[in-house]
Amino acid sequence: MDLKGKKVTIIGAARSGIAAANLAYGQGAVVKITDAKPLADIDKALAGLADRSKAIVEAGAHTRKFVQDSDIVVASPGVRKDAEPLQWAREKGIPVMGEIEFAWCFCTKPVIAVTGSNGKTTTVNLIAEVLKAGGNTVCLCGNVGTPFAQHVLTPGIDYFVVEISSFQLELCVTFRPYIAVLTNFSQNHLDRHPDMQDYFEAKKRVFMNQTASDFSILNAADPWSQKIEAGVSSQVVFFNKAGEARNPNHLAVLEVARIVGISDDMACKVFEAFPGVEHRMELVRILKGVEYVNDSKATTAESGLWALTRMAAPIIMICGGHDKGEIDFSALKDLVKAKIKKMIVLTREDVVRKKLHDAFEGVVPIEDYTDMGEALRAAQTQAVSGDKVLLSPMFASFDMFKNFEERGKVFKQMVNDLR
């Protein structure tokens, strides 16, 4: 892609937008950035630009004239595919793409992309560690850590391991990973996608450009994943098959390792040494015999189910947050009844509080809080030696925090401050 002298307009000045802007700068483009937030709110982010003085910035609102005076429009993941600025660009025939697609246009190394409703972050971290153990230089990026665009021109990389969300896939057009992994598929992000089918179609886009020389890795135990096999052109490999009684994330990674020529023994040694991912079933502290566990990354009912399956009773569970649309808690009820002694609902949204009460009222005692500190103190007061205090929200963080990382860090700090 020749960008010299071209006007590249970035929609959204968050991390992905700034990374895309810097990539465009390096290719000689004229960079424009538009963000609906006031300038004071994005000024810190703009400081990350390679050349802040040359950036043409529109803040406080998007305008048609600004967007349509472009050769290419690159949208951050937080921008909906039907957002008005993108519609303005399409009206003029201006190419619209997301940051992943934009970075892909400059990628010369194989990409291993992982998507799914749950387990993405653990899976990409394990893939990266296994590849490194096999002597490869790896860049782990995307929806975890730093944007793809920030690293795509880094020399000496053997593999890019990219965690990719449905939001990022929506605006992919030519993106073609050498290996694409779908960990699983379940209800999520129905505040952004109109229904499950639209969400599923977004996830499927990770496979759409693959050829017979590429690989698709699918979950044999997931009914939605099984629907994909007939529609792909790549070599399909299933993991989590009947009789494979192992962690599904490990099984998916084993298939990746086999494709790139790394032995099962070497991969399993990595699994044994892997310390886990921050904010995912992370033991923070044991205080007076009580384990405090940070599972802030659990933003779906399925991830809450996964946590409860792997923890021993009795549990005091802190859950709640920002509503993401329809959610089905039916599969959790028996586990909640068997393992949880108290459910502490932490949210500032009435709709979330109602959903949790409707699902678990009469199954387990419930208390409601709107402050993390108060919720944690209530848990500490009621916990006795042998109990586990588990932050596994099953909802997004945006009612109180900017992301699940901030929520987890606040929880950990408060836990470490407990006396």
Image: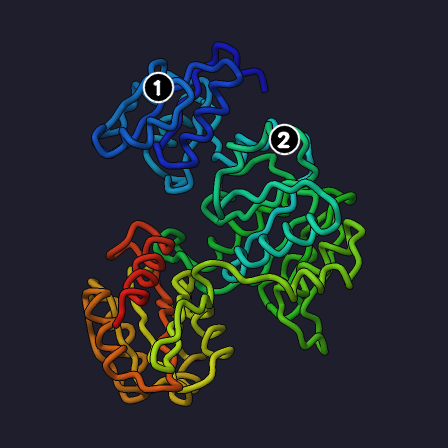
Q: Give the image quarter of residue 291.
A: bottom left
Residue 34 in view in this figure: yes
| Front-lying residue, 123 or 194 | 123
Relative to 48, residue 121 above or below: below
Where residue 372 sits: x, y (%)? 24, 65
Where residue 275 sits: x, y (%)? 56, 62
Image coloring type: rainbow
Q: What residue is at 54 percent from the left and 62 percent from the top?
A: 276
Q: Secondary structure at mark 1?
A: helix
The residue identified by callout 2 is 107
Circle nearer the N terminus (1, 2): 1
Q: What residue is at 47 percent from the left and 79 percent from the top?
A: 311
Mark 2 surroundings within 10 Å by alpha-carbon count, few (fewer than 14), some (14 through 19), many (20 or more): some
Mark drawn on residue 99: none
Q: What residue is at 38 percent from the left and 28 percent from the top?
A: 48
Q: Secondary structure at mark 2?
A: loop
Where residue 17 sits: x, y (%)? 41, 32
Q: For the residue marked with disc 2, what is the amino acid?
A: Cys
Left or right: where does residue 108 sit relative to residue 293? right
* Position of the C terminus by quadrant: bottom left
Q: For the residue marked with disc 1, what is the amino acid?
A: Arg
Left or right: where does residue 314 sit relative to residue 116? left
Q: What residue is at 40 percent from the left and 53 percent from the top?
A: 193
Q: Give the image quarter of residue 294.
A: bottom left
* Position of the N terminus by quadrant: top right
The residue identified by callout 1 is 52
Mark 1 surroundings within 10 Å by alpha-carbon count, few (fewer than 14), some (14 through 19), many (20 or more): some
